[in-house]
């Protein structure tokens, strides 16, 4: 069984969804310390041909608190209005905006819940059912850190194949994982391009942008545009 373990992000870039797509079980890594100024609560959309950041406030955010201990603010109407304004003329706005609103307005305001809703809603829209769980709910040995902690999660889930985003190549060595009986692969996204209603393509935006401009068939095709190395 292949698994991936990643911190929760709110409507991250498509590479995150590719990671969910390529594994048998995806673990939301929510029992680690919160990172300020990261992508847990923010990302970029396309507005008038330019990147524009949206940020959902996290009351009491601190690097000394676990992600699972924190919640998103309920003050999100201005963010939704910004998304509406940016994509009102996109071809799939009428289908996608209610999905986005459902996630942003989720009754459970915990970061873990809202971000996992963002995974499940997107895959549900595409007719897929990902297997998503939370590290905070797993009974693994938390005395470890780094790669050893990841392998402890692999052990409790009886997985011998761990998949990480390509950025993990600088942190994790295949030889070390292999010595512990775990294979490790790194997901490398291919070049992702699609029509955005303008003359110049703007890359590395939130999955919101992909969904607004691409049909279900095209989104599904883009989710498979990766290699495991």
Image (spheres, helix red, strand yellow):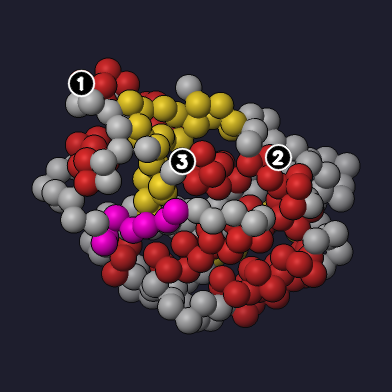
As drawn, 221 above or below 56: above
Q: Is residue 147 magenta?
A: no
- At a point 76% along the width and 67% down the height, the residue shown is 95
- Would you name the residue on which mark 2 appears? 221
Give coordinates of residue 9: x percent, y percent: 47, 56
From the image, which quarter does the N terminus lie in? top left
Label for residue 23? 3
Range covered by the magenta-colored residues: 131-137
Between 90 and 177, the one lying in front of the other is: 177
Give coordinates of residue 40: x percent, y percent: 45, 57
Q: Is residue 132 magenta?
A: yes
Which residue extends farthest left? 143
Between tags 1 and 3, which lies in front? Answer: 3
Q: Name which of mark 2 and mark 3 comes first in the sequence.
A: 3
Between 32 and 160, the one lying in front of the other is: 160
Q: Determine which quarter of the picture holds residue 188.
A: top right
- Would you name the residue on which mark 1 appears? 179
Q: Left of 84 or right of it: where is 158?
A: left
Count of numbered tags: 3
Q: CA distance from mark 2 to mark 1?
A: 35 Å
Q: Determine which quarter of the picture holds residue 5.
A: top left
Q: CA distance from mark 1 to mark 3?
A: 22 Å
Between 50 and 186, the one lying in front of the other is: 186
Helix or strand or loop: what does disc 2 sit on? helix
């Amino acid at each position: 069984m292949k698994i991936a373990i990643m911190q929760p992000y709110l409507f991250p870039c498509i590479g995150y969804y590719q990671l969910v797509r390529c594994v048998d079980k995806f673990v939301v890594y929510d029992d680690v310390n919160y990172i300020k100024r990261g992508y847990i609560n923010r990302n970029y959309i396309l507005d008038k041909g330019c990147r524009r950041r949206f940020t959902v406030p996290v009351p009491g955010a601190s690097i000394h608190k676990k992600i699972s201990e924190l919640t998103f603010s309920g003050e999100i109407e201005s963010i939704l209005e910004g998304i509406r304004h940016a994509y009102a003329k996109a071809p799939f706005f009428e289908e996608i905006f209610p999905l986005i609103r459902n996630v942003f307005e989720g009754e459970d305001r915990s970061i873990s819940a809202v971000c996992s809703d963002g995974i499940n809603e997107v895959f549900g829209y595409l007719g897929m059912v990902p297997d998503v769980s939370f590290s905070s709910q797993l009974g693994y040995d938390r005395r470890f850190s780094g790669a050893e902690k990841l392998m402890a999660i692999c052990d409790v889930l009886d997985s011998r194949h761990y998949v990480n985003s390509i950025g993990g190549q600088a942190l994790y060595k295949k030889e070390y994982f292999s010595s512990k009986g775990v294979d490790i692969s790194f997901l490398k996204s291919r070049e992702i391009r699609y029509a955005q209603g303008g003359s110049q393509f703007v890359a590395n935006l939130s999955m919101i942008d992909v969904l607004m401009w691409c049909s279900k068939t095209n989104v599904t095709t883009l989710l498979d545009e990766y290699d495991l190395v």
